[in-house]
Amino acid sequence: MGTLGRVIYTVGNWIRGTGQALDRVGSLLQGSHRLEEHLSRHRTLMNVFDKSPLVDKDVFVAPSASVIGDVQIGKGSSIWYGCVLRGDVNNISVGSGTNIQDNSLVHVAKTNLGGKELPTTIGDNVTIGHSAVIHGCTVEDESFVGMGATLLDGVVVEKHAMVAAGSLVRENTRIPSGEVWGGNPAKFMRKLTDEEMAYISKSAENYINLAHIHAVENSKSFEEIEVERALRRKYARKDEDYDSMLGIVREIPAELILPDNVLPEKTTTRVPTTHY
């Protein structure tokens, strides 16, 4: 480092030290209302070797999720809290409009015993339920993997197929389109109804809308959160009948209103489903 470099480095140290001192003074003035930020080594997106995640700008990745290495995620997809997508020894591809729900694990295998490479490919508008394990397999468009299911190396879940919650799908199993498989090991159970196949698409659509809400909430500053907390306290426990007797109309601030497409409709057609 030359003379000029050492001067610039020293000035930078002074500026950073001044900033830290000002931050401590500000925290003391705020007293018990101050927000202390602690450094976390967690990184939502992380490179490994020479590979880095390629994530569309419209994707929601929860703060506690980890997307690592050679991972590609398409528009409108969502990676929820506690998920790990680890593309280290091979690649992971996630299509558009797909949701991978909380605490799920997606990993890959370099090769199987026969030397075949085993990346993980997840198609468009797929729903992966909470705590599922997807390892070195293919999940095609508009399919459904239930909560806690495990898909081992070489599994193929065809379009409009469903894996029941808690199932273990053995290596190299192919689940045909329009079928429900479940159990340990997973076996054919029955055919999906048209209503159930429509529900799979609806589930993906619902999660796209829900992800937008979580993305907005996670992007809020501390000040915005405090303002909303105060507004909620102010408008809590208001009796609408009593207000109407007094001729009072209380308008709920726009910040507290969720979009219509996120709230459940008052009259909905019940879709027949089977619990596993």
Image (cartoon, grey):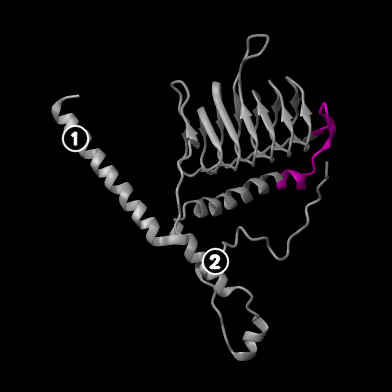
Question: Which residue is denoted by mark 1 in the rendering?
Answer: 8
Question: Which residue is denoted by mark 2 in the rendering?
Answer: 256
Structural crowding at the residue carrying mark 2, measured as other residues with C-alpha within 10 Å and reported as few (<14), some (14–19) or many (≥20): few
Which numbered disc flags the more N-terminal residue, 2 or 1? 1
Q: Considering the image in quadrants, where does the C terminus appear?
A: top right
Quote the CA–CA distance across marks 2 and 1.
48 Å
In the rendered structure, which segment of residues is drawn in magenta? 181-199
Tell which residue pokes out farthest to the right in this image.
189
In terms of secondary structure, where does tag 1 sit?
A: helix
Q: From the viewer's perspective, tell me whether residue 2 is left or right of residue 191.
A: left
Q: Quick one: 230 or 126, which is closer to the camera? A: 230
Q: What amino acid is found at the position of numbered circle 1 in the picture?
A: Ile
Residue 197 image offset from top left, x and y in percent: 73, 43
Q: Are marks 2 and 1 in contact (CB under 8 Å)?
A: no
How many marks on residues? 2
Which numbered tag is attached to residue 61? none
Q: From the viewer's perspective, tell me whether residue 94 is left or right of residue 46.
A: right
Q: Which residue is painted at 18% across and 29% down in the image?
A: 5
Q: Which residue is painted at 77% across and 22% down in the image?
A: 170
Q: From the viewer's perspective, tell me whether residue 36 is left or right of residue 207.
A: left
Tell which residue pokes out farthest to the bottom in this image.
246
Residue 205 image offset from top left, x and y in percent: 62, 49
- Is residue 151 depicted above or below 125 in this figure? above
| Residue 153, image quadrant | top right
Structural crowding at the residue carrying mark 1, measured as other residues with C-alpha within 10 Å and reported as few (<14), some (14–19) or many (≥20): few
Q: Does the magenta stretch include residue 68?
A: no
Q: Considering the image in quadrants, where does the N terminus appear?
A: top left
Camera-nearest label, 2 or 1: 1
- Is residue 167 depicted above or below 255 in this figure? above
